[in-house]
Image (cartoon, coloured by chain):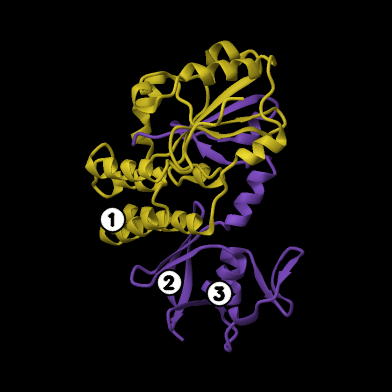
Chain colours: A purple, B yellow
Amino acid sequence: MTFQPFTLIDAASIAKIDVSIDADSPLVSNSTLQSAIGWSVKPEGFCREEICIPAGAAITRDGLVDLAAFARLMGRPLVVDVAERALSLGAAAAERSDALQSLEASDFTLPDLDGKLHSLSQYRGRKILLASYASW
Amino acid sequence: MYQELKDEGFTVITVALDKDPDAARPWIEAAAPTHPSLIDTKHVVADLYNMVNIPTILWIDEQGRIVRPNDVAYGNNKYQQVTGLDADVHKRALRAWVKGERGAFGAERARALQRLPTAEHQEARAEFALGQWLWEQGRTQAADRHFVRAGELAPHDFTIRRGSMPMRNIDPMGPEFFKMATEWREAGQPYYHPLPDE
């Protein structure tokens, strides 16, 4: 089992994690799952705060976590590029849909041209027109 | 008009879905806005709100609730010939809402008007994110593979297909874009069209 450093792109954050590729499956340790993704392995399965999901085949015989199987369990897309040693983990469609259908506008924090950060939530109390555009 | 409405408890927040701040800079500096003009290089807002093209607007009330979901509206009529949209329609509705003269959509209607993301679309976004990171590292060939895959998974998402063109050395105003737009039109303009007038 050889671990190599991979880059994990998760939303807008980048992390370096050790991954072992076994028959195309990206395997990571429990501690990597905890530190990089925020989920831990317990007897009940994959746990995060109060929630646990049975891990089933997502944990290998050697006690490593198959990230692809984990992502499938979470309904999240995981793109693996072995040659480039990079992985991209996206948000679950169900999570995005539920948030949109709740009609609670999801908070975000982004910089302006001066690099000053603004959060949507800091404008609570005002009516807001949120408008996206691009140079393309 | 936005200046006029500022005193009525209204704020515009613009979000540029561009790969770097310099791409959006000319627009922002020309407008010299007094409202927050944010740069979203990683398409965070596009992902959170399932935006598939620009411009996309939505209205959020004082309690942080979406009262008008994703809609197509322009600030002026520069593109009216192409889009067939009259910018004044939205402006009038916006002004009436801000001044409290008219409500926005009720919760049930707002929900019904939302287009929700699919698993495939989320995968497209993950592919796009990887493509962008690879491009930032100068690994353009590898980046291209992921941009192409993202486009296959979400063929009518302009933020992905057109948004990746500057990172693929493709002119976003050129024949590849024209082809994409034609395919979108021929598919019945899925996902991205103005909300019905209420």
Q: Which residue is mark 1?
A: B138
Q: Residues within 10 Å of mark 2 (few under 14, many from 20)?
A: few
Q: Is residue B19 visible?
A: no
- All told, the count of numbered labels is 3
Give me the C-alpha separation between circle 1 and circle 2. Answer: 19 Å
Secondary element at image label 3 = helix
- Which numbered mark, 2 or 3, is in the foreground of this view? 3
Numbered tag placed on residue A69 in the rendering: 3
**On the picture, is A19 further left or further right than B24?**
right
User: In the orientation shown, which residue stands out farthest toward the right?
Assistant: A50
Question: Residue A85 lies in what quarter of the image?
Answer: bottom left
Residue at 27 percent of width and 44 percent of height: B179
Locate the C terminus of chain A by quadrant: top left
Question: Going from the N terminus, do you reach mark 2 or mark 3 first?
Answer: 2
> What residue type is disc 2 on?
Pro
Contact? badges 2 and 3 (CB < 8 Å): no
Chain at tag 3: A
